[in-house]
Amino acid sequence: MPRLVDLSHPIADGQLSYPGDPPLKITAFRTMAEHGVRVSQLKLGSHQATHLDAPAHFYADGVTVDQIPLGRFFGPARLVDLAPGSALVPKTPITPEMLQPHAASFQAGGRVILRTGWDRTFNTPEYFTDLPSLTLEAAEWIAATGIVLLGMDLPTPSKIAGRACHYALLKKGVEIVLLEGLAHLELLPEEFTLAAFPLRLVGGDGSPVRAVAILPD
């Protein structure tokens, strides 16, 4: 049997959301005591915790979650560890020079996961404000490689380049699936199989995912 490694953060009532996004609220809609069955009501944004961005997140005519081929979310992936055995310091710019030694991992049609160690700050305000960030030049370098999925243990690719980073990675002809907010990447080998399927949200700009690494026994 293969070994499964959960790469997802939990989703819990009251958890912090990206600044400006809807607050996360999980409440009882039906209870065992009153109804003999339990049903919960979930209120959350489409980019809560471990999630993916579709091109429709930043482009009015962009592909939506339900239109992305399922094959993008499953298959061989490569880990690019930018801080082996440790973590990048807050607000570290991630530049093309940091990525170029790992150029062999950025194969056209492939899936690449960036590890910075930032998941250690999950559910703190700093998680959203002080993260290491791709520079615009790094985003453009990645966009030119032809990969189909870019994962990271960051809640968003960049505070340095902001929307420009998303525009570079999600534009037509590039349309890289952005898998954000991953966890436990230090447990992964350089090569593994990734499964990270979104909800089938019609017209969706993004979706929470349960990301899992599948490792040989």
Image (tube, rainbow, N blue to C red):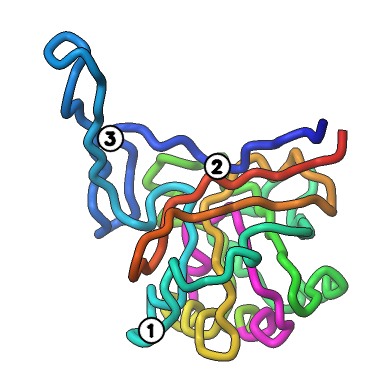
* Residue 206 % position (x, y): 41, 63
Disc number lying in front (3 or 1): 1
Can residue 39 be found in the magenta stretch?
no
Q: Which residue is mark 1?
A: 59
Q: Is residue 203 above or below residue 22?
A: below
Quarter holding residue 154: bottom right
Other-residue count near label 1 (Cα within 10 Å), few / some / many at <14 / 14–19 / ≥20: some
Q: Residue at x 50, y 39 (%)?
A: 9
**In this orientation, which residue lies closer to the viewer: 79 or 148?**
148
The disc placed on residue 203 is: none
Report the side of 25 relative to 1 (left or right).
Answer: left
Q: Residue at x 46, y 35 (%)?
A: 10
Q: Which region is colored magenta? A: 140-161
Other-residue count near label 3 (Cα within 10 Å), few / some / many at <14 / 14–19 / ≥20: few
Quarter holding residue 104: bottom right
Q: In the image as oriented, which residue stretches furthest toward the front?
A: 36
Other-residue count near label 2 (Cα within 10 Å), few / some / many at <14 / 14–19 / ≥20: many
* Residue 76 % position (x, y): 78, 59
Report the side of 186 relative to 203 (left or right).
Answer: right
Q: Regarding mark 2 in the picture, which secondary structure is present there? A: loop
Can residue 160 be found in the magenta stretch?
yes
Name the kind of residue labelled 3 in the image. Answer: Gly
Name the kind of residue labelled 2 in the image. Answer: Ser
Q: Regarding mark 3 in the picture, which secondary structure is present there? A: loop
Q: Which residue is mark 2?
A: 8
